[in-house]
Image (tube, helix red, strand yellow):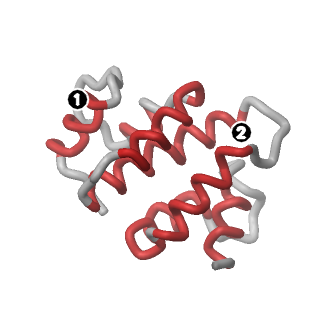
Amino acid sequence: MILRKEIIEQLSKKLSLPYLSVEQDWDIELADKNRIDEFISYYNENDLSAEVKYATMSIILASYEDFLNDRELERDYRWYEIEKILKSGRGLFSELMEYWAVDSEKENIFRIAPLIREARATD
């Protein structure tokens, strides 16, 4: 899903993200491993359109990837909530899951890839 500029601007404002202009990888650039709980809460506590859900999940996954890159953990309590959201919106998030899973015979490009693959494989 290609996110419209208005959606990115709206979400950036709601989440107080330091958004300046539409970047191709805005979610990766604005990811914040220290705000994962806040992003998950925003997703769960608001009545969001499909496009805003997708954008919010984009920032959640990018932030969780940053979190994993700084730790030896495979997952923590937040992953179970993220996984639940991904599974409940499997159709909506299929493109995001495909991106982060990086199905490849090569080593994992992203630390989150094995978790995403597992979430895609199970119900």
Q: Is residue 50 left or right of residue 90?
A: left
- Against 121, is 65 above or below? above
Q: Amino acid at mark 1?
A: Ser
Which residue is situated farthest in the right direction here? Answer: 72
Q: Relative to the observer, which residue lies in front, 104 or 66?
A: 66
Residue 20, quarter of picture: top left
Give the crowd class for mark 1: few <14, some 14-19, many >=20 residues within 10 Å.
Answer: few
CB-based contact (under 8 Å), mark 2 and mark 1: no
Residue at position x 62%, y 42% from top?
65
The residue at which mark 1 appears reads as 21
Residue at image position (27%, 31%) is: 14
SS state under label 1: loop
Give me the disc on residue 52.
none
Measured as percent of width and height from the top left, residue 121 is found at 67, 78
Q: Identify the residue at image location x=79%, y=33%.
A: 71
Q: Nearer the viewer, mark 2 or mark 1?
A: 2
Secondary structure found at label 2: helix
Residue that label 2 marks: 68
Residue 81: horizontal and vertical position, in percent?
60, 53
